[in-house]
Image: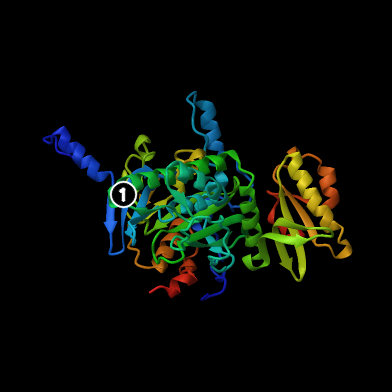
Amino acid sequence: MSAGVPDRQRCQTRTESERRLGGSCGGLESGAPSQNAEMSRHRSSKQEPEAAPDAWRRVAEIEKELLQWPTWSSVAAQERADSTDELSTSAADTVYVRIPLGETCGPGLEGVFLRLNALAYRREFNVTATLEFPGGRSWITIARVDGWPSAPHVNIRARGHPALRRLPAMVEGHHVHRFADNARLGRSAFEPPQNLPVAVPVNESIQSFRDFLRIVAKEFHIAPELDRFDSPDSWELLI
Amino acid sequence: MMSIALSLADIAAQIARSLVRVSSNDQMAQIATPLLYPGGSMVSVEFSRRRAGYLVTDAGGARREAELMGGERSFARVAPEIAERFGVRFDHNMIFDLDVAESDLAVAVISIANAAKTAVETTATHLAAGEPADFRISLWNRLEGLYGPSKVTRKRRVRGASDEWEFDATVLMKERLTLFEVVAPHPNAVNSAVTKFLDIQDLGDNAPRRIAVVIKKKDTPHLPVLARTAEIVPLDAPDKVFLRVG
């Protein structure tokens, strides 16, 4: 690994996002729907979808930094089902790393992680970054970036929503499932059966894993030092 | 934008072409099908030549989708049966069919794609409903995040006073071993955990520390009995609690 935990020198002043949010991001236990959403639900007789919790929004929007610099998982260490078939391949083995995040110039964000997931033996193909918030079975994914995806993304839910109709129906190539877009569909958009159904294309060029990390840092509001994080060790062996 | 001058047949042909994406290289070809995973990614299927026919797979896409939802255990359980239902197979990574004749490739692609989509959707449904086995994933993620993967062993067998038992996770810190067992809120789960913990407790002063990780504390029966053999920690306890007990 190329570096230690990034320094926190830039923590001299409150971040722009903090000012915008009007406070720090403490109190992550608050999984309650936003107060505004609650009020609007009472005002309207129409059944509104349950809003995504404010705590998720805060974590998605505040400036964050890496608290540790962990290493990628090894393929062999991962749990797998016993294979009884004659075919048992490693071509689709994945590796991942979970990086705990903290608020820039603030406390750690308990249970908030950046997860990077990649194919162990296929460089720059189906690389995914997710922003995880504690909850559900283990975590709730509140935003996601897909680099070099093997298949297009289809915005089937966006078509029926007035604020999302402008999005492309089909997204080819790198794309990002932003918290704000998916939150328009309510809390259920983050649950496994829907799993962040709204995505937009990444307009910047991504030529390398480092480029991918730059996009992740920008989209997830993570300190730019993230792009110093190494690609999976197993990629080094690939031609 | 489609021209209004086109016949319905022409429009249908255009739509048909836009429903799939095809890419290929020297080794394999890939078809992105109109089936969608939860989240909206098109289900893609790859195929490549083998000595006898073709290998057709989902390239691990279904398992990866499930993994990103935190449902790898559920997926590993449901995928073999679902693959069988669609007349294909599942190794630990991929839904696949082997030695496929060229004339059967289209059916194989349809089968793999539907099996992959169904397996991920079933996993998502299980996750939404709450599947006990996946709570182990939660525990592993928690412990590995707090102590580092090198200090945590998943599903380790440990010798007690009379027998050997498998625990969901162990943490070894400064030569001190701590055993973790996820306990579901029903009597059989509690009885099983008590039996294990009791035998470990009988090792005496040098017995490893024992932690019963309860999924729903208020619904867990026989808590006082469980508490005589292990410390009870709710799965959703704060990090500081898990750091204290490890």
Counting every numbered tag in the picture gives 1
Q: Looking at the picture, how far across and down is residue A137, in whole percent?
A: 60, 46
Measuring from the top left, give residue A122's x and y in whole percent.
41, 65
Q: Residues within 10 Å of mark 1 (few under 14, many from 20)?
A: some
Residue name at image x 72 percent, y 41 percent: B185
The residue lying at 43 percent from left, 63 percent from top is: A91
Q: Circle 1 marks a residue in which chain?
A: B
Mark 1 belongs to which amino acid? Leu
Q: Which residue is mark 1?
A: B105
Answer with left or right where residue B82 lies relative to residue B136.
left
Q: Is residue B234 left or right of residue A142?
A: right
Q: Secondary structure at mark 1?
A: helix
Q: Residue furthest top?
A: A45
As drawn, is B181 to the left or to the right of A50? right
Outermost residue on the front side: it is B52
Quarter of the picture holding the C terminus of chain B: bottom right
Residue at the spot 56% in from the left edge and 57% down from the top edge: A80
Name the residue nearer the viewer: A23 or A160.
Answer: A160
Residue A195 falls left or right of residue B9: right
Residue A171 in sight: no
- Seen from the viewer's position, the closer of residues B80 and A92 is B80
Q: Say how the picture is coloured.
A: rainbow
Query: Which percent across, then down, holds residue B34?
Result: 33, 43
